[in-house]
Amino acid sequence: TAPLAVAVSSLTLKGVNATVRLLEKTYVFAEAARAERENTSGTGDAARLEIRHEGKDLQASAFVARTEAGFDNPGAYICKGRGESGAKAQWKAGERTTVRGEVLRTEDVSTNAVRDGLAASVEQRFENQMAVELGVRHARENNGPAIPTGSLGVPSAGVVPDEVTTARARLTGPLPFLPGATIYGEGEVDVED
């Protein structure tokens, strides 16, 4: 029998990160990395910047991250050739009322495909430990699918609608026969179709 030949590619990963405290409960996090692979994808850079606030009544964060097509690091949370950004906030508007909002953008830097999304909701808690949350979500894609969904990472056209808006409701409460456990029911409906 013929010997089995296996091509091995070495990975060199270099990185730097920093954390800066802006205010008592507000921090900025920054990181940059370079991945170098011999005989395969070559060299690529990645960067991420985040600001986070953790207050008593307000929690908020915003981030932006980008990787070049040559950034081939399987251990990274963001794949090569991607751009990701977003922000979210949660505000305790009253003793039992919480308002939440989130915006996200994901993009394929090689095809310029982009998906933008936003969500907003209000949650009301009651004295009996029940909670009702009502919200809306909206998402829109441009220039094709922003996230590869086909086999081998090849985008598949027509998998998701180009634009969708939904309304959602969620009811959460304690499980009576199991102390400390909760149960919930959730429904979401497309409001455009």
Image: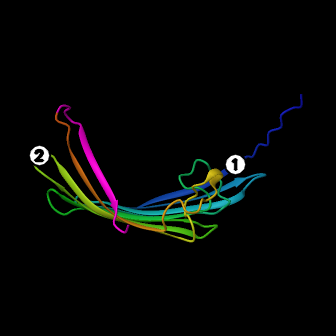
Q: Is residue 154 visible?
A: yes
Q: Which mark is residue 11?
A: 1
| Whole-percent x, y for residue 11 in the image | 69, 48
Magenta-colored stretch includes residue 12: no
Q: Between residue 131 and residue 36, name the one nearer to us.
A: 131
Residue 163 drawn above or below residue 133: below
Q: Which mark is residue 167?
A: none
Q: Secondary structure at mark 2?
A: loop
Q: Specify how the rendered protein is coloured.
A: rainbow
Q: Magenta residues?
A: 177-193
Judged left or right of residue 26, residue 111 is right
Determine the CA span between mark 2 and mark 1: 56 Å
- Residue at figure coordinates x 26%, y 45% from the top left: 184
Q: Residue furthest front?
A: 193
Q: Is residue 100 visible?
A: no
- Residue at figure coordinates x 87%, y 32% from the top left: 3
Q: Quadrant of residue 46 in the image?
A: bottom right
Q: How many marks?
A: 2
Judged left or right of residue 130, residue 161 is right
Q: Quadrant of residue 118 in the image?
A: bottom left
Quick one: quadrant of the N terminus? top right
| Whole-percent x, y for residue 145 in the image | 55, 64
Which residue was labeled with disc 2?
Answer: 128
Which kind of residue does numbered mark 1 sit on?
Leu
Which kind of residue does numbered mark 2 sit on?
Asn
